[in-house]
Image: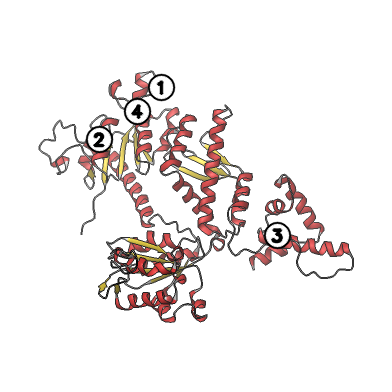
Amino acid sequence: MKARAPKLLIVDDGERYAELAHALLRDYRYATRCELSLPCWECPRREGCRLTHAHDWAETEQALRRHSDIDVVLLDLRFHIPVERLLPSDETRLAERQRLEGLAILRRLRRVRAELPVILMTSVEQLGPEVDEQVFAADEFVSLAGADAFDARALGLLIERTLARRRELGASHGYEWGESPAMARLRRDASTLARTSLPLLILGETGTGKSALAERVIHAESGRKGSFVAVDLAALPETLVAAELFGTARGAYSGAMEREGRFERAEGGTLLLDEVGNLSAENQRMLLLALQDGRITRLGENVTRKVDVKLVAASNVDLEAEVRAGRFRADLYARLNPAARLTLPPLRQRKEDIESLAQSFLRRTFAAGPDRALLLEYAEAAGLDAPGRVQLCVGKGVEGALSFVLASASLKALRAHPWPGNIRELELLIKSAALLALADAREAIERGRAGKEPNTIPIPTKLLRELLQASWVAPDAEVRTPVPSSMPRGKSLRALAQGLERDLFVRLFLETHGDFVAMAERLLEGDAEENARRVRLRFNQLGLRVRELRSRLEG
């Protein structure tokens, strides 16, 4: 089956770019405003037709409504059109408004279809110094020389590069894999197992992304046409689990109505049983029968119903240990295909992925909804174009993007954090930090204290550390105290106190991965950066050596 050709929307006040594309770039489909389905270059009414592309913002809106499957927008920079067809602007000079109308249309596109790739087409003489930086709001820009064959090749290469980036993003199905070796192996195995008929078992701590893996990767790559259906077994009372999974007949119990269960709703698709280790013995038996026979029986019925689902079971407990303890059926565990289980590592074991995960969560925060509305309000107040890209940076921002900037000490603190809540904790923390930093930046503008670079929004180190300290408490976390319950006796109280102080410093060093600022925050009140020097001095006075303790961390 031949793949669908990508669809392009051309936005240009003239005809040259449309004629160029239709003559030399015929491997694409085009979003026209015409009712006819045949390509423009084959149309007998082609001569003088004005429906081949959009000539202003009003016609662009019309094309966007008619075509929901546009892959790339090709946008001109200069528009020689009457003032009544130009977008509103504070600029009073007509020639200047016409020269920059493409940027005004780009800003509108970013508001209504932020995810849509845009290639801004310019000529060298159009790129004045005040325009250079603004064109970075487009995904790509190309300076066309005026020679048709050369321009078509340059444009074609950019279109393919833009489409390749989009395909790469789509291949991950919105799931952020990171770069750690463990996740690379997991990605390969998940893609392979998704396409089989076998049940699949996903193990991992709370917050590692088991549900997202099941929905965005396994179901997406399974090739199944049915729905993805998830049920959290830990959230259901034991007495309702069977009815929720298998459905009920009218009168099966007091007040029961005839309704289908989750197995039937997932027919032809994927069923995720989250926290499968919470099932009671009787519900384990019923699930085993369903897996063995491929059939289920609604409560109150005697008729079996055939079901075809891709079953994915997830758990945050060691099911093998539960089997040995007699709390989980060995035959059910075997049916869940444990030999091919997928184990998601905790975030503390994939620290190299923290920066890329944080970047992904930041972009997701401002992609749509009320949080994007807040970002657009800030951009308007700061006199910025509607941002197409939002970037998380370390040290300084990047040109052409609205940048949220972390200090290097903040990134170090993120990597030193134990992350008991795993990816879920990181996502909430990044979202909170970005929104609070955005609120501070907006307030600074309102009070007339805006900085020289409004497209750079710093995330203060103090804010991040406060969020880290309050972000998550592991449910099984022990209450820690600096004083152990049993202590070795010392020759003197001073020697005893010094020994306890050494033990405390060693423990804190290992817990914070050698971050003296983080150690200072847990030991002393006041400025952490200043206190870190005092902690380091005392560390040395106690005879402790960084190199020796780092070797323990690496070992």
Badge 3 density bin: few <14, some 14–19, many ≥20, Cα 10 Å: many
Q: What amino acid type should be assigned to the residue bearing mark 3? A: Leu
Mark in front: 3 vs 1: 3
| Residue that numbered label 3 is attached to | 508
The residues bearing labels 3 and 2 have C-alpha atoms spaced at a distance of 62 Å
The image's mark for residue 33 is none
Badge 1 density bin: few <14, some 14–19, many ≥20, Cα 10 Å: few
Query: Residue at point 59% right, 58% down?
Result: 473
Point out residue 224 in the picture as x, y percentages from the top left corner: 28, 64
Q: In this view, does 145 lie above or below 256?
A: above
The residues bearing labels 2 and 4 have C-alpha atoms spaced at a distance of 18 Å
| Residue that numbered label 1 is attached to | 90
The residues bearing labels 1 and 2 have C-alpha atoms spaced at a distance of 25 Å
Badge 4 density bin: few <14, some 14–19, many ≥20, Cα 10 Å: many
Query: Residue at point 44% right, 56% down?
Result: 176
| Residue that numbered label 4 is attached to | 101
Quarter-of-image position of residue 271: bottom left
Q: Can residue 123 be seen in this view?
A: no
Extreme residue in the left direction? 44
Q: What amino acid type should be assigned to the residue bearing mark 2? A: Gln
Query: Residue at point 62% right, 63% down?
Result: 477
The residues bearing labels 3 and 4 have C-alpha atoms spaced at a distance of 58 Å
The one of 333 and 86 positioned closer to us in this rendering? 333
Extreme residue in the front direction? 254
| Residue that numbered label 2 is attached to | 62
